[in-house]
Image (cartoon, rainbow, N blue to C red):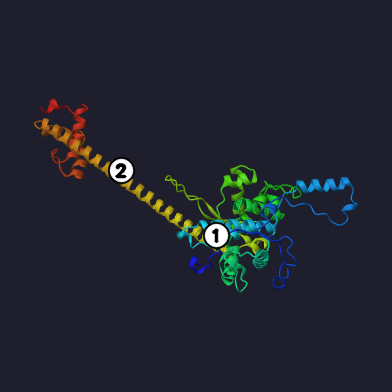
């Protein structure tokens, strides 16, 4: 809603005080869970409310011994202090009001209830309630604030509403719009102030730990169930499950270093836990890590099967389990396509290697043939040079050769077709061999 549509705050922007008032009967009728609001505070008691609450004396305390009272007081002192809901409500409103006043014209699109809802989301008394119950408590506090200011004759920040609209008085937004906006924000807010998603998942797993089936103990090193170790594989699975609930219906990144710091183990152990969770079907790997030297590397992302535990399925955002199944189908399809592509690449590589081997064999054959032809050419050139050198003696050499080796001579004649060495190179080669070996003398022919 734009600023023009909101009511302007009253002129007295101070925060005058008044006593805390009871909740009107109309509010309690609409919200049966609210019987009384003894923890509802007005804006004039900020100094007192921010102090630790004083222990109230209950019936029977006067009968306790001094040692019992000291022990109870010591135990209460050591317990973690939780801010009362009334104080948290006031602090959230003040922080939200300051943030809205500091916004510029470019931030008008932001909700005027975001900081208020986010701060209340982290309060332990509200984090586990349904949105309708939280809305009833908030409206009860707003009504009490208005009554407290009215008792002193002061106006709320946006002035008194003639219709008794407390949302309009304190936030400048009409009741119908404010209720819808607050519930929408409450359902969408995932991260509470002061802790990250991993810390929230760890705390949720401590409150409601996911237990693995007994069959997992046969293949995974799990600690003694009585110890409830936060460093074993079972706690990692629960952490991943509650992290999916915290993030909502979206892919989640699980940095081995960050998860290792939360669990107190090494990044390598988290890497092994992640691989086991994928093998066991709890987690699905939906995106591979992609390293980029430019510094824009993509981290690996995962999906958890919240449908395996009812505690997760009830609190997970609607569609989370269906998204896991869809992601599983998508990953399986991608894996099948990848295998098919790898098979095609393997076949193509095999074919390429066979073609390369065949081409190499043909090249070698061609090279051998060329080498043989070159040798034959050299041999013919040598024969012709020898024939030219012994041209005068050739007729006599042929006659002597015919007398000494008639079968061979006839064989040469039949195979090569003649007794002329200049035309029958095979015969010329044999003739040269017998001459050079001394079996047939050249001088006799001369």
Of residue 388 and residue 435, the one placed in the foreground of this image is 388
Residue depth check, mark 2 versus mark 1: number of the one nearer the observer: 1
Q: From this viewpoint, is residue 389 visible?
A: yes
Of callouts 2 and 1, the N-terminal one: 1
26 vs 40: above or below: below
Indicate the secondary structure of the residue bearing disc 1. loop
434 vs 191: above or below: above
Residue 113 coordinates in the image, percent (x, y)? 57, 62
Binning the other alpha carbons within 10 Å of mark 2 as few (below 14), some (14 to 19) or many (20 upward) gives few
Residue 427 coordinates in the image, percent (x, y)? 19, 38
Please indicate whether residue 289 sits to the left or right of residue 22 in the image: left
Of residue 86 and residue 210, the one placed in the foreground of this image is 86
For the image, the number of numbered tags is: 2
Numbered circle sitting on residue 86? none
Q: Residue at x 76, y 47 (%)?
A: 77
Of residue 274 and residue 186, the one placed in the foreground of this image is 186
Residue at the disc numbered 2: 364
Please indicate whether residue 382 sits to the left or right of residue 159 in the image: left
Of residue 365 and residue 443, the one placed in the foreground of this image is 365
Numbered circle sitting on residue 250? 1
Binning the other alpha carbons within 10 Å of mark 1 as few (below 14), some (14 to 19) or many (20 upward) gives some
Say which quadrant the C terminus sits in: top left
């Amino acid at each position: 809603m734009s600023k023009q549509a909101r009511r302007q705050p009253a002129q007295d922007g101070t925060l005058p005080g008044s006593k805390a008032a009871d909740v009107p009967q109309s509010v309690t009728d609409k919200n049966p869970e609210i019987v009384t609001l003894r923890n509802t505070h007005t804006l004039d008691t900020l100094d007192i409310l921010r102090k630790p609450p004083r222990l109230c004396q209950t019936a029977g305390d006067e009968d306790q011994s001094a040692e019992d009272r000291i022990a109870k007081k010591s135990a209460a002192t050591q317990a973690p202090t939780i801010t009362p809901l009334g104080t948290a409500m006031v602090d959230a409103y003040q922080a939200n009001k300051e943030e809205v006043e500091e916004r510029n014209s470019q931030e008008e699109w932001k909700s005027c209830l975001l900081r208020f809802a986010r701060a209340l989301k982290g309060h332990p008394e509200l984090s586990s309630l349904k949105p309708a119950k939280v809305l009833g408590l908030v409206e009860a506090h707003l009504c009490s604030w208005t009554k407290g200011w009215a008792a002193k004759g002061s106006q709320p920040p946006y002035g008194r509403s003639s219709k008794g609209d407390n949302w309009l008085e304190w936030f400048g937004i009409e009741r119908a719009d404010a209720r819808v906006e607050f519930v929408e924000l409450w359902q969408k807010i995932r991260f509470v102030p002061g802790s990250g998603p991993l810390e929230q998942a760890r705390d949720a797993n401590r409150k409601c730990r996911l237990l693995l089936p007994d069959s997992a103990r046969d293949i995974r090193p799990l600690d003694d169930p009585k110890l409830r170790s936060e460093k074993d594989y079972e706690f990692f699975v629960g952490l991943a499950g509650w992290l999916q609930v915290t993030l909502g219906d979206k892919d989640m990144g699980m940095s081995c270093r960050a998860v290792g710091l939360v669990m107190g183990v090494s990044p390598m152990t988290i890497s092994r836990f992640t691989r086991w969770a994928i093998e066991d079907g709890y987690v699905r790997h939906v995106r591979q890590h992609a390293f980029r030297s430019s510094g824009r590397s993509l981290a690996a992302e995962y999906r958890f099967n919240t449908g395996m535990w009812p505690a997760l399925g009830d609190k997970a955002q609607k569609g989370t389990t269906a998204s896991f199944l869809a992601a599983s189908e998508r990953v399986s399809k991608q894996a099948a396509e990848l295998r098919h592509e790898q098979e095609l690449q393997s076949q193509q590589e095999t074919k390429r290697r066979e073609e390369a081997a065949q081409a190499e064999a043909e090249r070698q054959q061609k090279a051998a043939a060329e080498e043989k032809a070159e040798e034959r050419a050299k041999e013919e050139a040598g024969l012709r040079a020898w024939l030219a050198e012994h041209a005068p003696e050739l007729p006599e050499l042929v006659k002597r050769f015919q007398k000494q080796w008639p079968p061979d001579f006839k064989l040469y004649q039949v195979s090569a077709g003649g007794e002329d060495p200049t035309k029958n190179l095979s015969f010329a080669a044999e003739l040269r061999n017998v001459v050079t070996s001394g079996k047939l003398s050249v001088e006799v022919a001369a």
